Image (cartoon, rainbow, N blue to C red):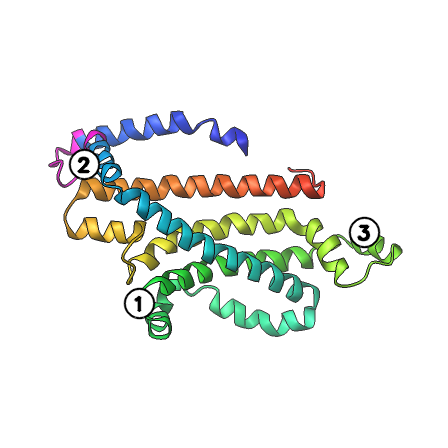
Amino acid sequence: MKKNYVYIPGAFILFVAVWELIALAGGWNEALFPTPYKTALGFGELIYDGVLLQDIIDSLIRFIIGYVTAVVCGVFLGLFLGWYKTAGGFVNPIVQVLRPISPTAWLPFIVLIFGIGEMPALVVIFIAAFFPVLLSTVSAVNSIEPIYLKVARNFGIKQPALLFKIILPAVFPRIATGFHLAMGTAWVFLVVGEMVGAQTGLGFLVVDMRNNLRMDLLMVAILVIGVMGLWLDWTISLFEGWIYKRWGIKRV
């Protein structure tokens, strides 16, 4: 995982070069398709005004609340449904029906129930992150190696210690994959959720700059969303590493 981040500077330089070439070849007005230089000036403008930093902070707060809540609920419910297969069999058809539905499809009902403001964005983030974590946890528990259960029985370990001290550490590497998938979808839908009713955040910044025809600042918002997504993925990787070290799990 660490090796992948070594290529970031080179990839960034290549991206900017291609961007500049497209802008030059297209011959568009900079007001419609900003160049990297024009976008850099817009970035400085948003930093100077304090708007960008505040929007990043607001988006991160919403994301952390929605994502962490979804991860906790998804892991606990996934452990329960994966271990108690009868309950999982009843719930699975419902999950499989709800899982493919885009969180944005629920927005009219979310706004009806929670109103306009912070809650729609939080609920959208929760829905986007919940199902990847839930399904990866259930799948991991269902495929656990029998040797772990035999060792637990030999030592007389019973519930709930069996579930949280034996099974959870054993299946965590597979659950962690769900964390990354959930992060990606939740961050994407955070922006969508903030476009509905929120008055701050990166999603609101995208809508505001688009409506004001400030394409340079719109490009800044888009790039910041991408960079923040990369940073969040890296942060989750650090959390994984801490868990692996704490539980003595060998990282692949």
Secondary element at image label 3 = helix
Residue 144 visible somewhere in the drawing:
no
Q: Which residue is mark 2?
A: 34
Which segment did they paint magenta? 24-38
Labelled pair 1, 3 in contact (Cβ < 8 Å):
no
Give residue 32's quadrant in the image: top left
Residue at 81 percent across and 62 percent down: it is 158
Foreground: disc 3 or disc 2 = 2
> Which numbered dot is residue 197?
none
User: How far, Cα to Cα, is label 1 from label 3?
Assistant: 51 Å
Secondary element at image label 2 = loop
Which label's residue is closer to the chain start, 1 or 3? Answer: 1
Q: Is residue 51 above or below residue 78?
A: above
Q: Is residue 74 left or right of residue 186?
A: right
Foreground: disc 1 or disc 3 = 1
Give amino acid for label 3.
Answer: Ile
Which label's residue is closer to the chain start, 3 or 2? Answer: 2
Q: Is residue 58 left or right of residue 98?
A: left
Secondary element at image label 1 = loop
Residue at 26 percent across and 40 percent down: it is 220
Q: Which residue is mark 3?
A: 147
Residue at 76 percent across and 58 percent down: it is 162
Residue at 58 percent across and 56 percent down: it is 136
Give amino acid for label 2.
Answer: Pro
Label 2 neighbourhood size at 10 Å, few (<14), some (14-19), many (20+)? many
Question: Which image quarter holds the C terminus?
Answer: top right
Label 1 neighbourhood size at 10 Å, few (<14), some (14-19), many (20+)? some
**Residue 8 x, y percent position in the rendering:** 42, 29
Give amino acid for label 1.
Answer: Ile
Is 252 contained in the magenta span?
Answer: no
Q: Which residue is mark 1?
A: 116
